[in-house]
Image (spheres, grey):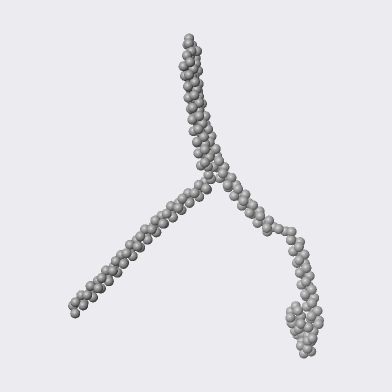
């Protein structure tokens, strides 16, 4: 309960002549009843503004555009990454595919050439044998030998092809991996050089330390000689 002497502290152009009624929790001033009510209206207005604000926030609460944008941008980056990697893989794929194709072509050409040659010889020989009056078992053996030689040559071509194709597959790698491996190799060489240099410097320091110790020893000996000489001179 305010004393009768305390006046309303309401601040405006004119001073309120009324006695204070209570302390306003809004502005912490001692106010008359009329001004307390006036301030209460202001607080109520603030309250309604807050309600409006809450309703507005609720209305826009379904708007996830900020997080959606983040997701979209990250997905775009992932897409770009995918495209670049696919281009890289495709470029390696095309090179290796063409190497496999040329290996295949070379092998088939080699095989066909040998087969044509051997079959030509076999047919010629058979025709000659057929013309003979007597067919000797050795003639058949000769033909069989030639057939075996052909089989052996084909097997050799197949093995050779397998080695070449395996080598192609085992050396397939993305250029960036090759680059990484090269960088690592370079780093290792640099590290080795650093270690060598450090080793060299350590050896020089050790040598200097030895020289210093030797000099110190010489100085001590010189001092001793001088000392002895002085003693003799006395
Ligand atoms: Zn107030
Ligand atoms: Zn007042």
Which quadrant of the structure image shows residue 51?
bottom right
| 174 shown above or below 50 | above
Image-based side of 230 in relation to 106, left or right: left
Residue 41, can we see it? yes
Q: Is residue 102 in view from this perspective?
A: no
Which quadrant of the rendered structure holds the C terminus?
Answer: bottom left
**Is residue 151 or residue 72 the one in the foreground?**
151
Query: Can you name the residue that lies furthest to the left here?
Result: 233
131 sits to left or right of 35: left
Q: Is residue 109 above or below residue 39?
A: above
For this view, does 20 lie left or right of residue 112? right
Left or right relative to 231: residue 35: right
Q: Residue at x 53, y 44 (%)?
A: 173
Residue drawn 68% across and 59% down? Answer: 66
Quarter of the figure with the N terminus:
bottom right
Horizontal and vertical percent position of residue 179: 50, 48
- Comparing 192 with 33, the one in front is 192
* Residue 103 vertical position relative to residue 137 in the rendered view, above or below: below
Residue placed farthest to the top in the image? 133
Residue 183 percent coordinates (x, y)? 48, 51
- Give the x, y percent position of residue 194: 41, 57
Residue at the image position 53 percent from the left and 40 percent from the top: 169
Above or below residue 1? Residue 129 is: above
Residue at figure coordinates x 74%, y 59% from the top left: 62
Q: Position of residue 72 (x, y in %)?
A: 66, 53
In the displayed image of the protein, which residue is found farthest to the bottom?
5
């Amino acid at each position: 309960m305010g004393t009768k002497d305390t006046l309303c502290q309401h601040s405006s152009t004119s001073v309120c002549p009324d006695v204070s009624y209570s302390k306003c929790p809004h502005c912490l001033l001692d106010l008359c009843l009329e001004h307390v009510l006036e301030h209460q209206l202001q607080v109520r207005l603030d309250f309604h503004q807050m309600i409006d604000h809450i309703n507005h926030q609720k209305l826009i609460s379904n708007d996830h555009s900020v997080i959606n944008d983040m997701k979209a941008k990250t997905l775009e980056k992932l897409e770009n990454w995918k495209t670049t990697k696919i281009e890289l893989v495709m470029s390696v794929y095309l090179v290796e595919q063409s190497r496999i194709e040329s290996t295949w072509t070379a092998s088939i050409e080699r095989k066909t050439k040998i087969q044509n040659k051997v079959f030509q010889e076999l047919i010629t020989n058979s025709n000659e044998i057929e013309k003979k009056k007597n067919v000797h078992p050795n003639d058949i053996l000769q033909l069989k030998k030639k057939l075996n030689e052909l089989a052996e040559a084909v097997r050799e071509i197949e093995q050779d092809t397998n080695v070449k194709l395996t080598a192609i597959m085992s050396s397939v790698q993305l250029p960036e991996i090759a680059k990484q491996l090269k960088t690592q190799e370079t780093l290792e060489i640099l590290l080795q050089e650093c270690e060598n240099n450090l080793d060299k410097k350590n050896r020089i320091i050790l040598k200097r330390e030895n020289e210093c110790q030797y000099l110190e020893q010489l100085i001590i000996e010189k001092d001793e000689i001088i000392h002895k000489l002085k003693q003799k001179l006395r």
